[in-house]
Structures are given as C-alpha cells and as structure tokens.
Amino acid sequence: MFKKRCVIYPKDVQIITGKSERYGQDLLNKIRIYLNKKPNQFITIKEFSEFSGIPTKDLEDYI
C-alpha cells in the first residue's frame, strides 16, 4: 500500500512553481512565520494550499 506524504519540501515548491529551490526555502520560511511555527516544524500540504491559494487536489498531482 502506497502512502502519500502530508508535508511539503522546498523541492516540491520548486516543481510546483518552476522557481528555484532557494525560493522554495524562503517561501516555506514565510509560511512558518505567518503560522507562528518554529523553524524545525513542518509545513503541511493543506497549510501550503491555504497560503498559496492553490487547491490541495492540484498540489497532490505534483507530490
């Protein structure tokens, strides 16, 4: 049985947006600040979806 991930990484942001991996790191850090998360906490696909405005269903196609 194959399980999908529930967190998003900078490489995923790079694939989704077509921008650099560094951009993905910066964007995830902005989301952490916005959500008052600590630097070591993960960003979920749902949180990324809400922040970016991209539907979760569309994001799952890339992950």
Image (cartoon, rainbow, N blue to C red):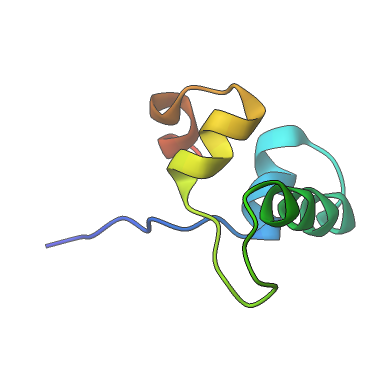
Q: Position of residue 57 (x, y in %)?
A: 38, 26
Look at 74% across and 54% down and name the residue there. Answer: 33
- Numbered disc total: 0
| Residue 63 shows up from this direction | no
Look at 53% across and 33% down and name the residue there. Answer: 49
**Quick check: 4 left or right of 22?**
left
Q: Position of residue 4 (x, y in %)?
A: 31, 55
Look at 84% across and 55% down and name the residue there. Answer: 26
Q: Residue furthest bottom?
A: 40
Q: Is residue 8 above or below residue 47?
A: below
Which quadrant of the figure has residue 60? top left
Q: Position of residue 9 (x, y in %)?
A: 61, 60
Q: Position of residue 1 (x, y in %)?
A: 11, 62
**Quick check: 24 left or right of 9?**
right
| Residue 10 shows up from this direction | yes
Pick the residue in front: 30 or 23: 30
Look at 54% across and 30% down and name the residue there. Answer: 50
